[in-house]
Every structure is written in structure tokens, then in C-alpha cells.
């Protein structure tokens, strides 16, 4: 842009240089974030649809379907909330456990394990698994009795995590099968999302559930 001197003649030119590379980088970053967000929304809706379908198959009445579906969707929302706060990097397993098991009386729940960070693809199914185990314990297991207790532990060896859920002092309603106990959904979550098998062990009054999975992305 030219400028004039005191004699109204052109005294020079002002040149403005704009670094367009930073603007282009910001635009590419915005496009990447938008694509990532769209992918997460699709995955979330797919998970919600699958959860509704699985809940309908196991429900004995409309009221039971509604209660279970709302609980499972709330579990998903808690997991997504923790991941969102962490900007979808990783979330503490301890924080996930505390959030999903917050409705259990703390005097009846023992949680222990080393500091451990879960990636989003691990955190979401683990959150659903914990919520489902707690719900089943309230209906059929240790939390359906006055003296029952739950112990949740985890340990890490190399890149592998072993998660253990132990119910003590159940009501004797378990017969050694997962049918009717709700663990079929847990097994599906583990096999679909974590690509692992569930190990369960029943005694007359207790349930031991163990899961091992890799921390590798």
C-alpha cells in the first residue's frame, strides 16, 4: 500500500506479510478434530444402540428394560465424561472405578490397585463391565444381602492388566451359570471391545470374576 509524503507525492510503499502457513496448519488441525469428533459421536451412538438391543433381549418386562437401559446409558455417560475431561487421552482406572461404583456403600466396597491409565478403547468397556457387575450384585449377589461385601482389585505385569471382582456373602441365588445373572452382557463387552475371554467362578454364596487385557493401543 503506497503512502504520501508532505508534498503529496508517493513517498514509499508499505508491504504487509502474513504467514499463511500457520493459518493453514490451524485449519488442518480443526478439520482433524472435527473428523475425530464425528467418529466418536458415531461410535457413541453405535454403542448406545447395541446396549439398547442387548438390554431388550435380557429384560423380562418394560419396567426392567427401562431401569437397566437407563443405568447402562448413565454408565456410558460417566465414562465419556471422564474421557472428555482428560481430552480423550487416558483416564485413571481408579477414577473410573470410583465413578461407576459410586452408588455402593463405601463400607461394603474395597478398591485397591496400582496407579494405572486406560486408553479410551479400554476405559469405555471397563466402565460398562464394572457398572454391570455392580448392578447384578445389587439384584442377585453380595449387595442383595445385609452382610455382603465386594472387593475390586487390579494388578499389572508388563503391558497386561488383571482385574478381579470378588463378591463375598451372597444370597446363594447363583447356580454357576451366567444366564439370568446378566454377565452375558459383560462377556460380550469384553470379547467385542477388549478381545478377551471372561473367567468366572461361582461358589454357593460368592462370585469371582477375573479379566486380563493388554494396555497396548
Image (cartoon, helix red, strand yellow):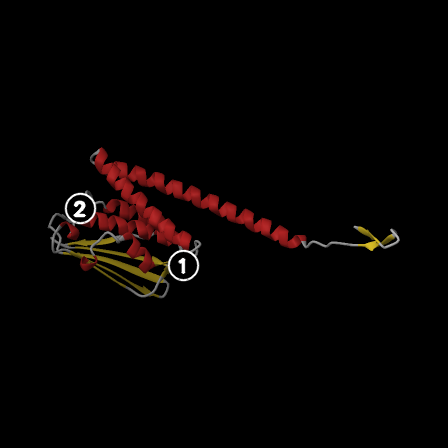
What residue is drawn where x is 12% and y is 51%?
Answer: 145
- Is 191 left or right of 147, judged from the image as shown? right
What residue is drawn where x is 31% and y is 37%?
Answer: 53
User: Where in the figure is residue 172, as x and y percent of width and height?
Assistant: 11, 50
Q: Which image quarter: residue 109?
A: bottom left
Query: Which residue position is annotated with label 1?
Result: 216
Tell which tag, 2 or 1, sits nearer the viewer: 2
Which element carries disc 2, helix, strand or loop?
A: helix
Which element carries disc 1, helix, strand or loop?
A: loop
Q: Which badge, 2 or 1, is on the more N-terminal residue?
A: 2
Residue nearest the observer in this picture, 1 or 56: 1
Outermost residue toward the front in this view? 6
- Is 45 left or right of 143, judged from the image as shown? right
Query: Which residue position is annotated with label 2?
Result: 139
Residue nearest the observer in this picture, 210 or 86: 86
What residue is drawn where x is 27% and y is 50%?
Answer: 131
User: Where in the figure is residue 193, as x and y percent of width and height?
Assistant: 36, 49
Task: Report, in whole angstroms, how far the alpha carbon at label 2 lies from the one at label 1.
Answer: 35 Å
Give the numbered dot on residue 27: none
User: Where in the figure is residue 40, as x and y percent of width and height?
Assistant: 44, 46
User: Where in the figure is residue 141, as x and y percent of width and height?
Assistant: 16, 50
Q: Quadrant of the C terminus?
A: bottom left
Q: Within 10 Å of the Cα at label 2, are there few (<14), some (14-19), or many (20+) other Cα atoms? A: few
Q: Within 10 Å of the Cα at label 1, are there few (<14), some (14-19), or many (20+) other Cα atoms? A: few
Amino acid at each position: 500500500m503506497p503512502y504520501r509524503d508532505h508534498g503529496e507525492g508517493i513517498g514509499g510503499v508499505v508491504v504487509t506479510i502474513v504467514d499463511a502457513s500457520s493459518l493453514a496448519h490451524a485449519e488442518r488441525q480443526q478439520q482433524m478434530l472435527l473428523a475425530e469428533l464425528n467418529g466418536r459421536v458415531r461410535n457413541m451412538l453405535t454403542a448406545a444402540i447395541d446396549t439398547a438391543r442387548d438390554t431388550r433381549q435380557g429384560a423380562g418386562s418394560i419396567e426392567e428394560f427401562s431401569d437397566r437401559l437407563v443405568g447402562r446409558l448413565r454408565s456410558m455417560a460417566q465414562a465419556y465424561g471422564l474421557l472428555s475431561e482428560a481430552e480423550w487421552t487416558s483416564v485413571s482406572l481408579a477414577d473410573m472405578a470410583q465413578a461407576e461404583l459410586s452408588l455402593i456403600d463405601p463400607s461394603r466396597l474395597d478398591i485397591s490397585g496400582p496407579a494405572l491409565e486406560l486408553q479410551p478403547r479400554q476405559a469405555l468397556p471397563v466402565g460398562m463391565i464394572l457398572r454391570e457387575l455392580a448392578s447384578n450384585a445389587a439384584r442377585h449377589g453380595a449387595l442383595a444381602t445385609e452382610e455382603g461385601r465386594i472387593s475390586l482389585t487390579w494388578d499389572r505385569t508388563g503391558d497386561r492388566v488383571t482385574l478381579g471382582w470378588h463378591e463375598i456373602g451372597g444370597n446363594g441365588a447363583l447356580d454357576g451359570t451366567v444366564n439370568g445373572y446378566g454377565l452375558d452382557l459383560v462377556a460380550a463387552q469384553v470379547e467385542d471391545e477388549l478381545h478377551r475371554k471372561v473367567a468366572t467362578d461361582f461358589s454357593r454364596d460368592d462370585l469371582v470374576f477375573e479379566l486380563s487385557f493388554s494396555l497396548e493401543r
